[in-house]
Amino acid sequence: MPDSKSAYGTAAASDTDFRRTWDRSEYEAKAKKEQDERRDDAKARYEAKLEGKKWYKPVDFSSLEATSARGSRLDVASMVGKSTLVPAGAGVGKRGKGAGFYCEACDLTYKDNVQYIEHLNSKQHLVNTGQSGEVKRATLQDVHERLEMLKARKRQQEEEDKRLGEVDIQARIQKAEEIDAAEREEKRRKRNEKRRKGGDGIKKEDQWEGRLGIIA
Amino acid sequence: MAHQADARRALDERGYTGALIRGDNPLKLFEKAVRDRIVDSYYWKEQCFGLNAATLLDRAVELTFIGGTYGVAQKPTPFLCLAFKLLQLTPDREIIEFYLQQGGEEFKYLRALAAFYVRLAWEKDEEVYSTLEPLLSDYRKLKRRTRESWQITYVDQFVDDLLTKSRVCATTLPKINPRLFLEDENRLEPRVSALGEELEELDHDDEERVNGQSDESDEGQMNGHVDGNGLADSQPDHRSDDSMDGD
């Protein structure tokens, strides 16, 4: 497949020009660099171990950027109830991608969203993402601008709501009542159908099916 | 001049260096139990990390109720967490005044938050009274979360609680001299109530009624508004304290 020879001769196949091509030399250089770095780190770690010390990767503290607050909520509920295929060791330990919340920068997995958020706030993660854990102090000017921005956003929201939704409280109450009545009708209909189909004897057992053993 | 994204350093008992309030770590204004609940809460960890005085506005405008801790597990409200963050940041006076005035015009919970901070952090009693008393004419409604349920309150009711009660929103407020004491010391002008003229009129009516008829029901009503000896009520009304319970 990598050879672009067609069955009819040595001319390059032109019907696969839409496929992506990769610059091999660039990726080769990248791989070599990473390999060299890893080798140097391993050597330093080994030497420190011989002396009985632990080696830490040197961090350039002056090049770290200031931290800022999160812009959006953390996405913790999107994968609930879904099934994914994971490698065999997924349930064990923190290192590497496993089942749970995965942090790419540090290559760690957390089973709990609380542990995950604590990790995102930790020094280890901040350094790995190039942040310093210090926040820039805000001046009165910054506060002023921020307030203006929030006010503008609030106005926009109000206008959107006005355009799209019903603002009048009475109309909304009426709509909610209609929806409730419709739901009740549906339920009543379903109940009547069920009653017509199944007899009375089965009903009692159904109540307890699956419920035994709950107390245990 | 940057401050930390997290409160870990500030909460550490060993060697706190930073702004002091009443000679101590500002975070100590909240009790240890409340401090622990706040720092362990998900809201604090997710949304109060890395805030500064400007980005705190984002969170403050999303507030929909005030309150201290609620529930069996004493869960802190977002209001309390943001107040704790303000104590950690200790913003400048002008920023707090900005929150109170311009910010508060548009967003009432921001005003409540700033008022809470003023009452906790500012040390000079006169400044606290003179900054918070104009808010007593703000009649907007606030939602308040008590330990087991909800209550409706008003901005001016909340500010009055701050000035008169000893425990508000799960915190014991620092001691403040009563207004009469400050007036006696000439540190403050005597209180001019916004209802000033109306109360005077009620006084006149009251005296006329007493002199004219002995109509029991009317007197009962009048005495409900005015102090017994006929002076305009310049003291905070302690009668309403009994009906407000919970922190």
Image (cartoon, grey):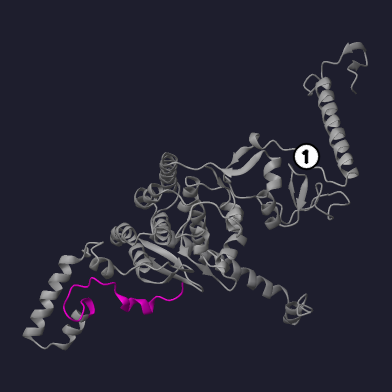
The percent coordinates of residue A52 (x first, y second) are: 87, 47
The percent coordinates of residue A159 (x first, y second) are: 41, 45
The percent coordinates of residue A191 (x first, y second) are: 64, 72
Task: Quarter of the image for the N terminus of chain A: give it.
Answer: top right
Is A3 left or right of B56, judged from the image as shown? right
**Residue at the disc numbered 1:** A57
Task: Quarter of the image for the C terminus of chain A: give it.
Answer: bottom right
Range covered by the magenta-colored residues:
B224-247
Q: Is residue A8 above or below residue A117?
A: above
Q: Is residue B62 above or below residue B220?
A: above
The answer to whether residue B100 of the structure is visible from this angle is yes
Q: Can you name the residue that lies furthest to the left here?
A: B212
- Secondary element at tag 1: loop
The percent coordinates of residue B177 (x first, y second) are: 33, 68
Which sits in the foreground, B184 or B205? B184
The answer to whether residue A185 of the structure is visible from this angle is no
Which sits in the foreground, B246 or B33? B33
Residue B234 appears in which quarter of the rendering? Answer: bottom left
Which residue corresponds to the image point at 35% horizontal and 67% vertical from the top-left? B163
Tally the marks.
Answer: 1
Is B61 left or right of B7, judged from the image as shown? left
Which sits in the foreground, B185 or B150? B185
Q: Amino acid type of disc 1?
A: Lys
Residue B130 appears in which quarter of the rendering? Answer: bottom left
Magenta stretch, main secondary structure, is loop
Dot 1 surroundings within 10 Å: few (below 14), some, or many (20 or more)?
A: few
Which residue corresponds to the image point at 66% horizontal and 53% vertical from the top-left? A117
